[in-house]
């Protein structure tokens, strides 16, 4: 009888620990989630965990109509734009402007940009390294992807319609932004100084450009036991090198557990609770560096919760 009571107490303690971990995870996401400027889907800032919960319920409802329903994962693909730039933006000539877009979905979406309908080259935007048969595709891959388009030394020729295009193997969504370029209201002395700034900017471009991360995974949920691929794509001249830092501030290198792909993405194999936390992607070249942080949350399948 005493042994039975001990088992019950141990089970109750384990349940409380699990709930505490989830509560702490929610707090971490609330602290780390910082909405950027743009056109959100609602006026109030919604945290990442709320999105994941809503979309997971949405996937469940889709599965209810299937006689072959599996509780293991939610494979119904979907894709939604979470945040896009304003429909019309005014930029001052010679300034630097950044357009940002965010998409959520499963499987993990990628984002690219168009200028007047033509694709802007920002480097490789392929979703997965399909040539590596050892990489298992995630069972859930419920994630949010962000992308930035950098417009340096804005010129009248940059005035155009820019389109954020989010895509996955099953879906594609987009949103347009009309960028207008206006001249600076300046004196003759300002004009001379500004012309010098343009010349300096163009000269600097001819010698190279700093490393900049233009697409990355912002937050992601994946099932324990799966392999997960975290996106990190950077551009710059010369081509940036990509490195990753784990939740314990440890530098991640290629091993049985981790693999850094040629495009900069990080693959984590056989996901476990210990893999939960913030991961930092760092892009670097001789002209500068850039970094971004994402949150990875491993979760149990429904039939094991």
Image (cartoon, helix red, strand yellow):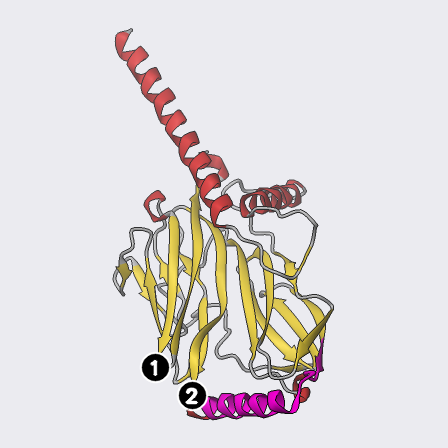
Q: Position of residue 4 (x, y in %)?
A: 31, 12
Circle 2 SS class: loop
* Residue 76 circle label: none
- The structure residue drawn at horizontal position 48% and vertical position 53%, both measured from the top left corner, is 220
In the image: residue 191, left or right of residue 126: right
Q: Residues within 10 Å of mark 1 (few under 14, many from 20)?
A: some
- Kindly identify the residue that appears in the image at 41 percent across and 74 percent down: 263
Percent x, y of residue 286: 34, 81
- Image spot of residue 154 (x, y percent): 61, 83
**Magenta stretch: includes residue 230:** no
Q: Is residue 188 above or below residue 71?
A: below
Assess whether residue 202 is covered by the magenta stretch: yes
CA gap between label 1 and label 2 equals: 9 Å
Would residue 225 be seen by someone viewing this image from the given angle? no
In percent of width and height, residue 40 lies at 67, 56
Which residue is situated farthest in the top direction here? 1
- Answer whether labels 1 and 2 touch (C-beta < 8 Å): yes
Callout 1: SS: loop
Give whichever of discs 1 and 2 has the lower sequence position: 2
Q: What span is in magenta?
A: 179-205
Mark 2 lies on residue = 208
Quadrant of the rendered image containing residue 14: top left
Q: Which mark is residue 286?
A: 1
Viewed as shown, does residue 224 lie left or right of 79? Answer: left
**Residue at 53% of width from left, 92% of height from top?**
196
């Amino acid at each position: 009888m005493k042994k039975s009571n001990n088992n019950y107490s141990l089970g109750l303690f384990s349940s409380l620990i699990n709930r505490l971990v989830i509560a702490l995870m929610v707090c971490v996401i609330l602290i780390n989630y910082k909405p950027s400027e743009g056109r959100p889907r609602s006026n109030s800032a919604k945290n990442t965990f709320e999105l994941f919960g809503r979309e997971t319920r949405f996937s469940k409802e889709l599965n209810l109509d299937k006689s072959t329903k599996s509780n293991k994962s939610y494979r119904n693909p979907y894709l939604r734009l979470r945040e896009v730039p304003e429909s019309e933006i005014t930029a001052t000539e010679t300034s630097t402007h950044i357009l940002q877009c965010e998409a959520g979905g499963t499987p993990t979406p990628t984002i690219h940009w168009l200028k007047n309908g033509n694709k802007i080259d920002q480097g490789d935007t392929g979703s997965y390294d399909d040539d590596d048969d050892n990489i298992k595709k995630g069972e859930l891959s419920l994630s949010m992807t962000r992308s930035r388009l950098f417009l340096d030394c804005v010129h009248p020729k940059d005035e155009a319609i820019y389109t954020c295009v989010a895509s996955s193997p099953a879906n594609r969504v987009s949103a347009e932004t009309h960028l207008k370029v206006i001249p600076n209201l300046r004196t003759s002395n300002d004009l001379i100084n500004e012309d010098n700034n343009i010349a300096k900017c163009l000269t600097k471009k001819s010698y190279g450009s700093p490393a900049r991360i233009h697409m990355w995974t912002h937050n992601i949920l994946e099932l324990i036991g799966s392999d997960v691929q975290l996106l990190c794509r950077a551009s710059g001249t010369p081509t940036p090198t990509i490195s990753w830092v784990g939740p314990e501030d440890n530098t991640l290198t290629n091993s049985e557990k981790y693999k850094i792909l040629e495009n900069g993405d990080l693959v984590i194999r056989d996901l476990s609770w210990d893999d939960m936390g913030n991961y930092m992607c760092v892009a670097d070249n001789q002209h500068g560096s850039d970094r971004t942080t994402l949150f990875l949350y491993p979760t149990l399948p429904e039939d094991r919760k």
